Image (cartoon, rainbow, N blue to C red):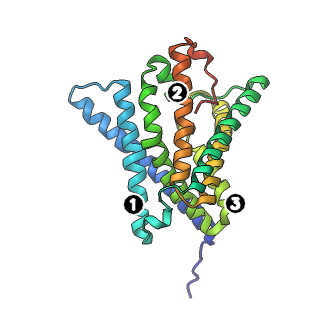
Amino acid sequence: MSITTRVPDPIRSLGVAIGLGGAGLLFGILLVDATGRAVTSTGLQLSPLLLLVVSLVLMQGVAFGGVTLVYAKYRGFGPDHFGISIPSLRDLVAIIFGYVTAFGAILVIGNIIRVLGIQGAPNQVAEISAQNPEVLLFLIPASFLIIGPGEELLFRGVVQNRLRESFGPVSGILLASAFFAAIHFAALAGGTGARLVTISVLFVPSLIFGIAYELTDNLVVPSLIHGAYNATLFSLLYVLLKFAELNPDALPSGVLF
């Protein structure tokens, strides 16, 4: 007589959610690497800006979107499952409130970190931008067109929804937000301790994105909040680097991204 061991649904949901998010990242990394190798084999050299453009399109666009489409087809979900619609007046209020809250929270946390003398880890994009500020002029519109929509589609539309099925809205938001913040580990520069500080900081805006999605049931809302949040930070960094001649070493690590 055989005994079949059934994995509890919450554990299965957690594994599936992490697997889907990880699959999107892995697929994106492989695409970017393969494209880079293909270009290099032709003798061409991608500029930092062009490399960033290709990376964003392949990662947040093709990879994240591709994993979402495969998952949706497997589960039999249509666009309605993700809640994609033109924002209503209520949604617009949520977008404004979410943006102000996320940006205000990150400023407060940044000041606390600075006062306490805690060292965070800067995003690698910040280091590239310090050498070539014009990169930020691309990242500002890309925040609305690629970064915000792509990341929210996978990590809120897929991961958070999957976790919500078994854990409920509160735990689903918390787990998805923690996972989203944690996946930035590889994109950060510096030691493990500094990276963990930055991940803890990133959990706050991630939490706000998740709450906005839960309350409005419209993926466009967190996508626009996320896009506006990133675009504002990129804009401020550009002004500081270009006009205030900010020393790259003086960048407020752990706060910008």
Q: Is the residue under label 2 in contact with that under label 3 (CB below 8 Å)? A: no
Mark 1 is on which residue type? Leu
Residue type, label 2: Ser
Q: Earlier in the sequence, mark 1 or mark 2?
A: 1
Q: Dot 3 corresponds to which residue? A: 170
Label 1 neighbourhood size at 10 Å, few (<14), some (14-19), many (20+)?
Answer: some
Q: Residue furthest front?
A: 89
* SS category of the residue bearing label 3: helix
Percent of width and height locating residue 3: 58, 82
Q: Earlier in the sequence, mark 1 or mark 3?
A: 1
Circle nearer the N terminus (3, 2):
3
In the rendered structure, are the residues bearing label 1 and label 3 in contact, judged by CB atoms less than 8 Å apart? no
Estimate the x, y position of residue 165 in percent, counting from the top left.
60, 68
Q: Secondary structure at mark 2?
A: helix
**Which numbered marker is on residue 235?**
2
Residue 179 appears in the picture as rendered: no
Q: Nearer the viewer, mark 1 or mark 2?
A: 2
Type of the residue with mark 3: Val
| CA neighbours of label 2 inside 10 A, class few (<14), some (14 to 19), many (20+) | some
> Is the residue 159 above or below the residue 183 in the image?
below
In this rendering, would 230 be left or right of 253? Answer: left
Secondary structure at badge 1 equals: helix
Which residue carries the number 1 mark? 69
Percent of width and height locating residue 94: 62, 51
Q: Is residue 45 visible?
A: yes
Q: Is residue 37 left or right of residue 42?
A: right
At x 49% / y 44%, what residue is drawn? Answer: 148
Q: CA distance from mark 3 to mark 2?
A: 33 Å
Q: Compared to 149, does 47 lie above or below? A: above
